[in-house]
Structures are given as structure tokens and as C-alpha cells.
Image (spheres, grey):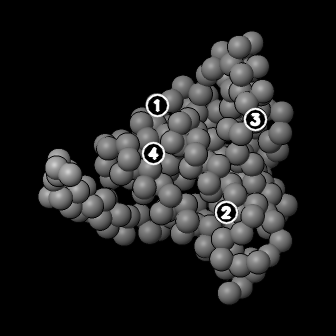
Amino acid sequence: MATVINPDEIKERIETAIAVKRSLLDQALTIGHVAEAWLDALRAGSKVIFFGNGGSAADAQHLECELAGRFYLDRRPLPAVALTVNSSSLTAIGNDYGFEQVFARQLEGIAHPGDVAVGISTSGTSPNVVLALQKARELGLVTIGLTGRHGGLMRELCDVWLAIDSEETPRIQEGHILAGHIACEMVEREMFGG
């Protein structure tokens, strides 16, 4: 078998990912603020609501299940929702109101003051995520944004804004999951020990 894959290219991608993750050291306080916002809401009986598109939708579902299921500990489930999982709602709202409304409309139906809205977008400019954060603010939710380096339109809509220091979508998504995992761990430890 002829080798067409250059191991040096693979090493370069790994080095880039390491550098992006190392830059999260400067975001430790912000990651702590994310965990505290989730913790405050969950202790008060409120919920954490995640949303995003594409890979960010997958990240929303991933982080939701870490709270609703378990992270490290076998413990009671925590109230968390991913607005990306109901294909009937997404397609009906998209068809009837426009795709930019798919998250905002769901939020309007299920969110209550004190809940936390977590919008995830590598660019920070996804119209449906931006509109959902605007709606979340109107509804009295705490707003959290996970974005890439610049934050786009989301930056100004978030009570807590976590920017991954990259412009490469895969590296940003990897940073979002690392930060989200850390926040999940902190929440679980504070609520259940261990």
C-alpha cells in the first residue's frame, strides 16, 4: 500500500490543537463562570438549555447528556435540554416561521426566568443562535455563548462569553467540548461531591 498521508501534517494538526487548548488556560475564570451559572440555575430548580447548528448541535446534545445523564458520578439527572434533537419541531418551525426562528420559538415555549441559555456557534453569527440569545434575554434567562476568537454578534448578547482562540472550526469545537466538560465536572462535584 502506497503511503499518501504525511505524518508531519498530522503532527502539525495535533500541535495546533494543543496550542488552542493551552490558550484555554487564560479562560479558566470564564469557564468557572459558565459552571457557576449552570450551578446557580440547577440549584434553584431551573434548567440549562443548549442549542447550535451542525457540529455545534452535536456539542449541544453532548453537553446536555453529560448533565441529564452522568459525567463521572452515578447521581440523579439534572434538568438540561438540547433544542436540536426534535426534528419535527425544527422542520415545522423552520417551514412555518423560517430557520432563523427554530431555537427562539422553542425557547419561548419552554424557558422560564432563571434558566440558562447556552448558544454555541464557532462564528458567533449564526442567525438562529443569535435570535435565540436575544429571545433568551427578553425572557429573563442567563445567556452563555461559546464561540470562536471574535464572537461575532453573540458577544454582546451573552452574560458569559467563552471565546476559543482560533478561527478553525474543528479546533474551536474541540475547545468548546473541553471547556464544557470542565464545567460539567465542576457542577457535578459541587452538587454531588466526589
Q: What residue type is labelled 3?
A: Asn
Question: Alpha-carbon distance for marks 1 and 3?
Answer: 23 Å
Q: What residue type is labelled 4?
A: Thr
How far apart, in angstroms, are the residues tagged by discs 4 and 2?
Answer: 20 Å
**Classed neighbour count for the residue bearing mark 1: other residues with Cα under 10 Å, few (<14), some (14–19), many (≥20):** some
| Residue that badge 3 annotates | 86
Is there a contact, CB below 8 Å, between mark 2 and mark 3?
Answer: no
- Element assignment for label 4: strand
Give amino acid for label 1.
Answer: Thr
- Position of residue 18 in the picture relative to residue 158 (left or right): left
Density class for disc 4 (Cα within 10 Å; few <14, some 14-19, many ≥20) is many
97 vs 110: above or below: above
Q: Earlier in the sequence, mark 1 or mark 2?
A: 2
Q: Name the residue under label 1.
A: 125
User: In what element is the residue under mark 1?
Assistant: loop
Task: Where is residue 76? Give x, y as percent.
Answer: 83, 71
User: What SS does tag 3 mark?
Assistant: loop
